[in-house]
Every structure is written in structure tokens, then in C-alpha cells.
Amino acid sequence: MSSVEGQDSSCPDTVSAWAALRVATPADAEAVEALMKESGAALFPRVYDAPQTASALHYVCVPDPDLLADGTYFVVEHEHEVVACGGWSRRDKLYTGDDAAGDDRLLDPAVEPARVRAMFVREDWTRRGLGRRILEASEAAARAEGFTRLALSATLAGLPLYLAYGFQPLAETENVMPDGVALRCVTMEKAIPA
């Protein structure tokens, strides 16, 4: 397949034939962390100041071993390189740096929403539908386990993707990182169609 004139063929507009979505495993942790940090370093400075970006890179851009072990996390690969990652969780935890009590507790799909977690896309692969592919796979998997809603805490960098996918904002929040730095985020929910 040839590339569009003037476009780098290593990062095509039409990703379906070029990028493969698969369930991540614990063996992917190093590649996932590298992508998270690269994506965060490129995208967070657009919406957060320098101390917030540094804090987010340290506390938010870290793979959650539970997500990788639970089989609820996805990677998108192009030529064996991870270019996007994200997933969902059946656990009561919104992000890796969330050390709140009960975060390993399994959610009740009858009354609680599944959590969308740790969505990152490499900067040169944004706006090509990779985030949407991961959200679609996460929604389908959560539906198969009986969940009827998805919830998340969106960073300001991720907000446009979630709005475009149909998430509804609930509240603006200040998520305080362990170093005391606050990140403005937006809690959101979306119904999972039957």
C-alpha cells in the first residue's frame, strides 16, 4: 500500500491495515511505560504547566501491573512497536497513582461502572482512531462481563477523545499526586449500549 503524497508511510492515516490491536501482557510493561512517558511528555505540556507535567510523568505515566495481569489492557502495535495503549478495569481504581483504600476491590457490574484506564497514544499517531479502537474494545469487553456503564477521570489532554466518543462530563476535579501537585481532570461517564 502506498502512502499519501507528503505523508510519512510509517504513520499512515488509515491504520486498520497497519496497526494491530491486542491484549497486553505483563511482558509489555516496559514498552507500555516508555510509550506512556513519551506521550505524556509530548501532550501534557499543552494543557498543564511544568510542575504538573513532571508530576504526571512520574505518577500517571506508569503501567498498572493489575491491568496487565487482568487481561483488560490493550496495546496497538505497528511493526512490533507499541504506538497506543489503554484499557478498562473491573477494579475500583481510576489511575495507577491512586493509592486510595479499596482500589483492588472488584466492582459490581450490576451497580457500578467499569473504569477506563491509562489511555496513551504516541504523539505522531494521534488523530488516527487508535484511541477510539481501544475504547471500542474496552466497551465490548466490559459489556461481556455485565457492565452497563463506563467511568473515567480524564486528563485535559484526553478530554477531546472522550467527548468525541460520547462520554458525558460529570465534574471537574483536582487530582492531587503523591508529591502534592494537583492536576485538573474531568470525571466522566458513558452508558454501554446493550
Image (spheres, rainbow, N blue to C red):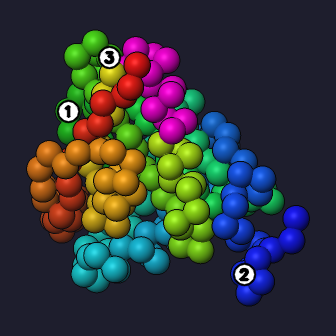
Mark before the other along the chain sequence, 1 or 3 = 1
**Along the viewing direction, whichever of 186 and 96 lies nearer the viewer:** 186
The answer to whether residue 1 is visible is: yes
Name the secondary structure under disc 3: loop
Q: Main secondary structure of the magenta part?
A: helix
Name the secondary structure under disc 1: loop
Q: Which mark is residue 7?
A: 2
Q: What residue is disc 1 on?
A: 101
Query: Amino acid type of disc 2?
Result: Gln
- Residue at 65% x, 51% y is 76
**Along the viewing direction, whichever of 87 and 55 lies nearer the viewer:** 87
Query: Amino acid type of disc 3?
Result: Pro
Name the secondary structure under disc 2: loop
Q: CA distance from mark 2 to mark 3?
A: 44 Å
Of badges 1 and 3, the one in the foreground is: 3
Residue 116 picture location, percent across and down: 38, 40
Q: Which mark is residue 109?
A: 3
Q: CA distance from mark 1 to mark 2?
A: 48 Å
Binning the other alpha carbons within 10 Å of mark 3 as few (below 14), some (14 to 19) or many (20 upward) gives: some
- Residue at 20% x, 54% y is 186
Residue 35 magenta-drawn? no
Q: Which residues are magenta?
A: 136-147
Q: Is residue 37 above or below residue 190?
A: below
**Along the viewing direction, whichever of 132 and 48 lies nearer the viewer:** 132
Mark before the other along the chain sequence, 1 or 2 = 2
- Residue at 20% x, 65% y is 183
Query: Amino acid type of disc 1?
Result: Ala
